[in-house]
Image (cartoon, grey):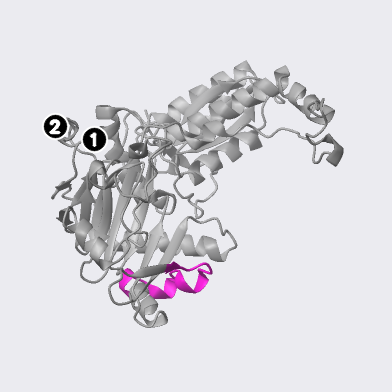
Amino acid sequence: MAPSNSVLDLPPEPSLALPRSFWKTFVKEYWNRQPTVFRGLFPAHFPTPQDAFEAVLACGERYRKGDFKQQIRIYIEHEPEPGQVPDYSSIFSLSRYLPVPEDRTLDGYTARMTHQLKGRRFGVLLNNLQTYHWNHWLQVKSFLGGFFQALGVPLSGVDSTLFMGNYLYTPFGVHKDDLHIFNFVIQGQKVMSLWPFEKLAHREELPKDGPNLIDHNALIHLRDKADEEQLLSQAKFLEASPGDVLFWPASYWHRAEPGKGMCVSASVGFNFRPPEFVEMAPEHEWPDRLRHTEMPGAPKWKVPNALKSSIGKRGKRENVMAADRESTAAWVRFLTNGAMEGVPPEDRSAKPVTGQDWVRAHPSRPIVTMPLPGGQVLVAANGRSSMLAANAAVSRRMEKLVATLNAGTPVRVKELEEAFFTKLEGRTFKRGALQGLLNDLVRWRAVQHCEPGQEA
């Protein structure tokens, strides 16, 4: 293999990385202590209104193709009765209310929505924003690098959420999350009312027993306008402009307050609980049904034999190995995704690689290989992975191939293939499998087409 003798300049990527001095001050003065506004942190690469529009447009395209599991909510505001606070309703059939290419911009989408809703205010909330926009995934990942260095990696998974609309208040009212929040203001003025936990913890609608409420989600039920005014008299208010970043700890109650026109912001939230996927066991064969006579009821009831058989099989060596593989793969995907909950969008327009193509990976987002029990190897990048059957020789060659790509130096696909298959038994690993893996890596944006460098 004859790669170029130096790493060529990689194309610039949007970065929101902050210096260590910022994070040192943040930990000392604000982390788990108090809310604040950071002004003018980023001279470039801040999310834009067009980024937000493109993300919601991508969500709409998935939704209209039949993928109804998109984590998006659209709220409509209703005029309050005298002495009351506004009510909000949620739209369940979303197709007509999601962006279409003809909207072209956020302003175009806002104008269409305002017309459709006959002037009523609305709000759009999109979770896992980074899964719809590659640049935003890069922005969040770079921003989190300094946080991780200062405070560690929160294994609960980081989520970025888009808030977009001309609504007066947060549609679900005064509440607290179980997440520490950074909120990036993209468009409009963002005004937040905030309360320390103890200010509102005495309210009668809140549970007084059970789990420690300060660490969990909770909601305040405003009785009327007078109740709202009494709460606001105790609040701290923070106002932020486009380019500013708000922060508040998980212990703080909060609500967005009225601003002027359309407001767009993206929050990045996290805590330090275990990730959801640790509770998910790999697929296992259970009986599809039991007889009604096998339900508890008899004086000497026992676990039905069909269940006992399945439980016993689950403890066999091959099933333990499968659980080991699945758990390892889930953790590797999670960590290569920057400890974020949702993976970035695939590049569906990527061209399949040919032997004459030059490719490389990005050294700051390395591809990972990991041997797994049962003669398999895991190849993972940017939150996605592929499991391949591989003996020890194939695993070693896969590690070498990935190391070559991770160097960031342009290399020809044909040379990668020659180095991989030279003196490797023909039936050990098929060329089609390697080409399929390379195409996966390109689609995952872990490997990119590039121009050749100077030959060594």
Task: Name the residue at 80% across, 36% down.
Answer: 295
- For residue 194, above or below residue 327: below
Q: Please tell me whether residue 92 belongs to the stretch shown in magenta.
A: yes
Q: Please tell me whether residue 12 belongs to the stretch shown in magenta.
A: no
- Identify the residue position indicated by label 1 in the image: 32
Task: Name the residue at 50% across, 64% down.
Answer: 61
Q: Secondary structure at mark 2?
A: helix
- For residue 419, above or below residue 128: above
- Number of callouts in the render? 2
Quarter in which the C terminus is drawn:
top left
**Residue count near mark 1 (Cα–Cα under 10 Å), binned few <14, some 14–19, many ≥20:** some
Residue 321 makes an appearance in the image = yes
Decide if residue 453 is on the left or right side of residue 404: left
Decide if residue 397 is on the left or right side of residue 219: right
Question: Where residue 52 sits in the image (x, y, percent)?
Answer: 34, 60
Task: Name the residue at 34% across, 81% down.
Answer: 119
Decide if residue 238 is on the left or right side of residue 12: left
Q: Nearer the viewer, residue 226 or 141?
A: 226
**Residue count near mark 2 (Cα–Cα under 10 Å), binned few <14, some 14–19, many ≥20:** few
Decide if residue 232 is on the left or right side of residue 322: left
2 or 1: mark nearer the eye: 1
Question: Where residue 171 sits in the image (x, y, percent)?
Answer: 36, 62
Residues under labels 2 and 1: Cα distance? 18 Å
Lower sequence index among marks 2 and 1: 2
Q: Secondary structure at mark 1?
A: loop
**What residue type is disc 1 on?**
Asn
Q: Which residues are magenta?
A: 89-107
- Identify the residue position indicated by label 2 in the image: 21
Residue 424: name its quadrant. top right
